[in-house]
Image: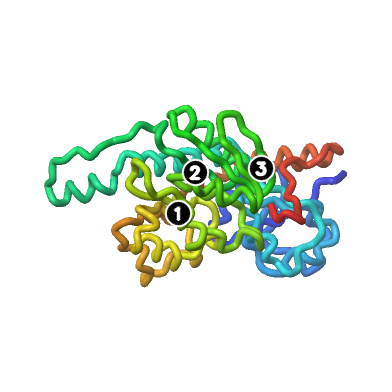
Amino acid sequence: MEKGKILLALTGFHPQRWRELLAAEREVVLEPDGPSDPSITYAVVWKQKPNLLSSLPNLRAIFSIGAGVDHIFADPGLPDVPIVRVVADNLTQHMTEYVVWRVLDHHRQSMLYRAQQQKKIWREPPQRAAEDISVGIMGLGNLGRAAASVLLSLGFAVNGWSRTERPMKGVSTYSGEAGLIPFLNATDILVVLLPLTPRTQGIINYGVLKELRRRNGLGGAVLINAGRGRLQKDADILRALDDGTLKEASLDVFEVEPLPKTSPLWSHPKVFVTPHAAATSDPAHLVPIMLLQMDAFERGEKLENLVDREAGY
């Protein structure tokens, strides 16, 4: 199998470093030479232009540079070739750090302490042990399982929910529609790491949030979303915060990004905002994995971490 060109099609990422690293081993182009360019065999993409890939006759596989692949499925002209999602230790480590950071920040009541500092109040509130706090992770894929493992090591009780049953030692697992409400009822801090699919879009709504356990040592339920922005309804989160359904929230993703300056989430006293920065894709770590996959594929080996088109992730 001959090596062809790589089409690098990125929106929202500067392509230069990606191009330099890919070009160390293969020829890279930023645009096809016409709509039916026969020289392109792989596409490395993030939010590629619609129909850009539709008529490339020798395209063998599409690689996403981010953990999510919903941006690929948004292309109405998506060709029927394998789609590879990124799985890298570096990306997993970044996401685990973010989740643990935000869980500990809420658990140790940092918002309260920051408010007390502004008012120069010297007061120590009651602090419950980690084992008394239940962290529920929606999405038990590679990222969710890595975060769950560290949270378990810190002593937290950990629940997990996924579309299909995903057993994990030490984690109370729930699955499917029947398991969602019991999972939420047993959760104090909800961590959302789900992929975005037609079935999960808008799943973090008021009806779901009101099922979280509020009578706990934290003084209320907490939401952490580091998955995809369109998993949540921003207005429902604000409603839940204002009526006490939620005590606090840490949000890394939003329905519209960048988050509009007019959004009340920016200045809400119970919300911690980060700019979709929980786990940034680092080309130095991801490009070598992609190149190894391409080499192996050309030797007749199977591609790894393939996206299930029917499931959408």
> What type is the residue that disc 1 sits on?
Asp
Task: State the SS at label 1.
Answer: loop
In the drawing, does residue 299 fall left or right of residue 270?
Answer: right
Looking at the image, tell me whether mark 2 or mark 1 is earlier in sequence order. 2
* Distance of label 2 from label 3 (alpha carbons): 50 Å
Residue 105 seen by the camera:
no
Residue 234 drawn at (x, y percent): 45, 65
Q: Depth check: 139 or 23 in front?
A: 139
Residue receiving disc 1: 252
Residue 180 drawn at (x, y percent): 59, 50
Picture residue at 19% right of the left edge, 38% below the top: 124
Q: Depth check: 164 or 261 in front?
A: 164
In the drawing, does residue 135 fall left or right of residue 202?
Answer: left
Task: State the SS at label 2.
Answer: loop
Task: State the SS at label 3.
Answer: loop
Q: Depth check: 293 or 87 in front?
A: 87
**Can you tell which of label 3 and label 1 is closer to the viewer?**
1
**Can you tell which of label 2 and label 3 is closer to the viewer?**
2
* Distance of label 2 from label 1 (alpha carbons): 24 Å
Picture residue at 78% right of the left edge, 69% below the top: 35
> In the rendered image of this protein, does residue 182 appear above or below residue 13?
above
> What type is the residue that disc 3 sits on?
Ala
Residue receiving disc 3: 24
> What type is the residue that disc 2 sits on?
Ala
Residue 57 seen by the camera:
yes
* Distance of label 3 from label 1 (alpha carbons): 34 Å
Looking at the image, tell me whether mark 2 or mark 3 is earlier in sequence order. 3
Picture residue at 44% right of the left edge, 48% below the top: 213
**Disc 3: CA contacts within 10 A as few (<14), some (14-19) or many (>=20):** few
Q: Which mark is residue 186?
A: 2
